[in-house]
Image (cartoon, rainbow, N blue to C red):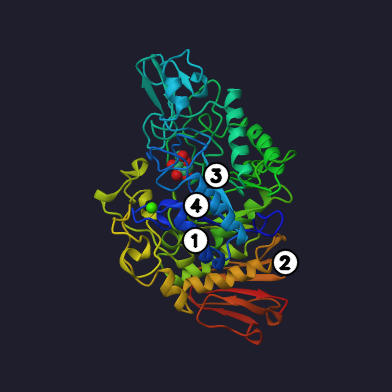
Amino acid sequence: MPRKTPWWRSATIYQIYVRSFRDSNGDGVGDLAGICENLDYLQWLGTDALWLSPCMPSPNADFGYDVADYFDVHPELGTLADLDRLIVEAARRDIGIMLDLVPNHTSSAHPWFVDARSGPGSSHRDYYVWSDPGPDGGPPNNWVCATGAPAWTYDAESGQYYLHNFLPSQPDLNWWHEPVHEEFEEILHFWFDRGVAGFRIDVAHGLYKDALLQDNPPVLPTDHPVIRRGKLRPVYSSHRPEVHQIYRRWRQIADGYEQEPALLGETWEFDYQRFGDYYGREVPELHMGFNFGFVEAAFRAPDLAEVVEGTLAGLPPGAMPVWTASNHDVGRFPTRWCGNDARAVKAALTVLSTLPGTLVLYYGDELGMADVAVPEALRLDEMTMNKPDGGRDRCRTPMPWSSDENAGFTSGSARPWLPLGEIGATNVRDEQADPGSVLNFWRQLAALRRDGRIGGVEKLERVLLDDQVWAYRVGEVTTVANLSDQVALRPLPGAGQLSVLASSGASHPGAEALGDVRLDPWQALVLSTRP
Ligand code: GLC
Ligand code: CA
């Protein structure tokens, strides 16, 4: 386990999409042993914990987000013994292992659902959400699933519909049914007993549904743009207040373990107060929540400043903010935010690392790895197959370790499960050798985080904000970021006494040069009142 306590405060967590990190046995699919073999790299990067995308047995309709057994490891990825070994080996390097827990739904191949589907009298029927048809014989209400199709599938055998907010092969669990709580509490104990450092909780805002299954209302012009991408506000199909009961119970369980496991929710909530509610107000709930308002913000000074300040104001006192900009759903920030311009990538990493709180990087972020245009014939993600942006496969491609064949991802001759992009200089080996690489810049930031010089949770104060430049102070450190492709010259009060901890640009001013700060396009500076 990591050495700080609790380990997850101001931590650096690294998300690994297991199928794409490193293939140890040459079958073209990344695996747990491949992670284990590269722990020295992950330690060198400065990570406190790894969050592994789902590793449990799954028919892979949604690559592990359709779980068929919560107590085992998917054979393609390894064995339970491999996971145990990974936990032990990672702990030797002060790295914790977090798993991805999927409590909103199971796979339709899970024995609970197989039984539930066998008929209304089956003992697992109420584990899922069933309903008679609507008055017209169609679905019970207007809810739509992640593909935009109706969220209900008809079961001819029983004449009822079952609910799935994602694919039809991912039936939603019924959290109004107490045995479901008991099952998941057993699952938590099982993995905490094995020493996991916590869970990322999938669809954390969605577990409860409205008991009356009321229609979702239409979106409002005032809704967040992400909500407005759909036609309906998902206020009855998810985001129910009852969900907080679950996290109060889970928090107690987690806090009873010596390794202080963290519960990190996938909390899609754009209202700052309601987002903060997931941490718990009177009673503690999740240790942390992913902040999608930040993930979805434009990479512009005013947009980021607004979301960061709003988020911090909405969190309960003492809460640990989480900053992340890439993942396996939304894409990679070097592409989404930075147009694959390494200067902008370094500026983004500077901002992510100097905001007060815990940072979650996605594998490849440290290299400036870009999304890959996966040719249509090779696309695999059923949920986003028809999306014009290339779907989610674009951000799930194999990690480039070198410029060798298959980028050093696989040892064998099998074709990697998703294609690699063009193999250029963006790979671990070449970037390690290049002092000006994104990777070596990340290492400087990581060292400052490790030493507690940045990322601590002192109050954030705005120093300067305009269309181009955002400067903020956290404790003794001031970050000045030029989030534009133009040179910026700004007066920075007291700048003369500041020393430079890190500079993302080509020019590295000394302390004496800093009365007025001159920033190259996309340059970010980390300045301190302490030498
Ligand atoms: C979450 C996951 C996503 C998955 C979905 C259904 O949003 O991040 O990858 O498809 O839940 O489990
Ligand atoms: Ca493999």
Labels 4 and 2: the sequence-earlier one = 4
Packing grade of label 4 (10 A; few <14, some 14-19, many >=20) is: some
Where does label 2 land, which residue? Answer: 475
Packing grade of label 2 (10 A; few <14, some 14-19, many >=20) is: some
SS for callout 1: loop
Q: Which mark is residue 266?
A: 3
Q: Amino acid at mark 4?
A: Glu
Distance CA(mark 4)–CA(mark 3):
14 Å
Position in image of residue 505 (x %, y %): 51, 78
Distance CA(mark 2)–CA(mark 3):
29 Å
| Number of the front mark, 1 or 3 | 3
Packing grade of label 1 (10 A; few <14, some 14-19, many >=20) is: many
Where does label 4 land, which residue? Answer: 296
- For the N terminus, the image quarter is bottom right
Q: Looking at the image, do the residues carrying marks 4 and 3 touch, with CB atoms under 8 Å apart?
A: no
> From this viewpoint, which residue is outermost toward the bottom?
512
Does 13 appear above or below 407?
A: above
| Number of the front mark, 2 or 3 | 3
Position in image of residue 320 (x %, y %): 67, 52
SS for callout 4: loop
